[in-house]
Amino acid sequence: MHIISLEGLSTITSVGQDLRIWDNQSLQNLDALSNITAINGYLHIEYNAVLADISGLANINPSTIGGSLGLYIVYNPLLSIC
């Protein structure tokens, strides 16, 4: 089963450790994550076949992204900008 929407996560404002969005064949955007301002770990977005918009991550403070991978956005063929 693949995630189609992250709508249920729209009230989250921070992540305690690492955010990984990986191998979803139906997820088109990350709009529901627009309230997140801190990750406190790595941000890993990989192998999402139809993900075309990551602007929902625009409010994340870059200084809160770290961990072992840091910012890692690869193999999302429909993203025009990574």
Image (cartoon, grey):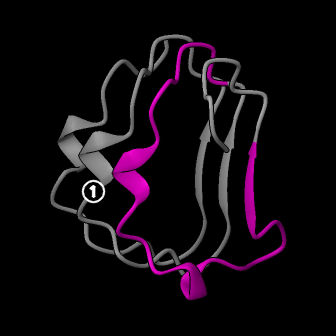
- Counting from the top left corner in percent of width and height, residue 42 is at 68, 68
Q: Is residue 15 left or right of residue 51?
A: left
Query: Is 20 rendered above or below residue 29?
Result: below
Query: Is 15 rendered above or below residue 5?
Result: below
Magenta segment includes 11: no
Our reading of the magenta stretch's main secondary structure is: loop
Magenta segment includes 56: yes
- Counting from the top left corner in percent of width and height, residue 54 is at 46, 42
Residue at the image point whose x is 38% and y is 40% from the top:
30
Residue at the image point whose x is 44% and y is 21% from the top:
27
Badge 1 amino acid? Ser
Residue at the image point whose x is 35% and y is 49% from the top:
56
For mark 1, what is the residue?
A: 34
Query: Is 5 rendered above or below residue 71?
Result: above
- Quarter of the rendering containing residue 70: bottom right
Q: Is residue 10 left or right of residue 49?
A: left
